Image: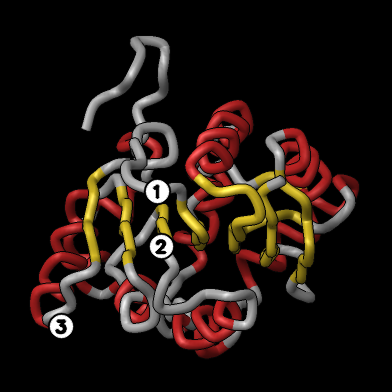
Amino acid sequence: MKKQQNWMIDEITCAGRENLDVVHVERYDKKEDAKADREVNLLQKMGFNSQSEIVEIGAGTGQFALIAATVCARVVAVDVSPVMLKQLRLKVEESGLSNIEAVQAGFLTYEHSGKQADFVYSRLALHHLPDFWKVIALKRIHRMMRTGGIFRLWDVVYDFNPDEIDKRIELFCNTLGEDIKKEWVREEMEEHIRDEHSTFRWLLEAMIKQCGFEIEDVNYSPDGFFGKYILRAI
């Protein structure tokens, strides 16, 4: 995997420290539940079936890819982290599934081949890119999809007024649910805010529309930190 131009950002350096850490990746499935069954069921209601081809960007250890592959024709599981991909490939080998292609790349470096994707899926990955690069990523996703295709985007998105930043961030870092506290600590939440690139919904949604997507549905978490989008390529 290499940068396409000298002026391009290095996606691996943006991957997040923990996603390149062997210990974190080995414990990832215990720390993070992708709700893959629920997500696949949601996509099935929108036409995801045995003929569909889907690209997942930020596939991690393959929680979603492995479930999706039991339903559709082809899954391309893309991740910049070689550590994550090693875990994913081991799980694919153990599963016996033959329709998952694991690719080390990211939003800015993945080159799609074959027919245009019917679906694209990305969960908790886009926020690793600064906003300028989010726009380039969204444009690249749009180009790899067929017209009318569905992009499911689930990410950390700030759904609150900028005047509330201090209060909201403190709550985010300090009042995690008991189930999350068992695996995530305050320092990790602070690291996310400090070192990664989550953005406000009014910025992200402008990018989404500018890049050729229609927002069909969006749901924000009550704490104002997570957005789940259904986007259609137009």
Horizontal side of residue 50 vs 222, given as left or right: left
- Left or right of 143 on screen, residue 102: left
Q: Name the one closer to the observer, 178 or 146.
A: 146
**Alpha carbon distance from label 3 to label 2:** 19 Å
Q: Which residue is mark 2?
A: 53
- 10 Å neighbourhood of mark 1: few (<14), some, or many (≥20)? few
Q: Nearer the viewer, mark 1 or mark 3?
A: 1
Is residue 132 shown above or below 44? above
Which residue is at the front of the view, 180 or 228?
Answer: 228
Q: Is residue 30 visible?
A: no
Q: Nearer the viewer, mark 3 or mark 2?
A: 2
- Tell me residue 213's x, y (percent): 71, 46
Q: Which residue is mark 1?
A: 115
Secondary structure of residue under mark 2: strand
Q: Can I make out residue 226 in this image?
A: yes
Image coordinates for residue 74, horizontal then vertical, percent: 32, 65
Q: CA distance from mark 2 to mark 1?
A: 8 Å
Which quarter of the figure has residue 194?
top right
Name the residue: 56% across, 49% down. 146
Which residue in the structure is indicated by mark 3? 95
The structure residue drawn at horizontal position 80% and vertical position 58%, both measured from the top left corner, is 159
Q: Are marks 2 and 1 in contact (CB under 8 Å)?
A: yes
In the rendered structure, which disc, 1 or 3, sits on the residue that comes first in sequence?
3
Q: How is the image coloured?
A: secondary structure
> Who comes first in sequence, dot 3 or dot 2?
2
* Left or right: 144, with 227 as reference point: left
Residue occupying the point 69% across, 64% down:
230
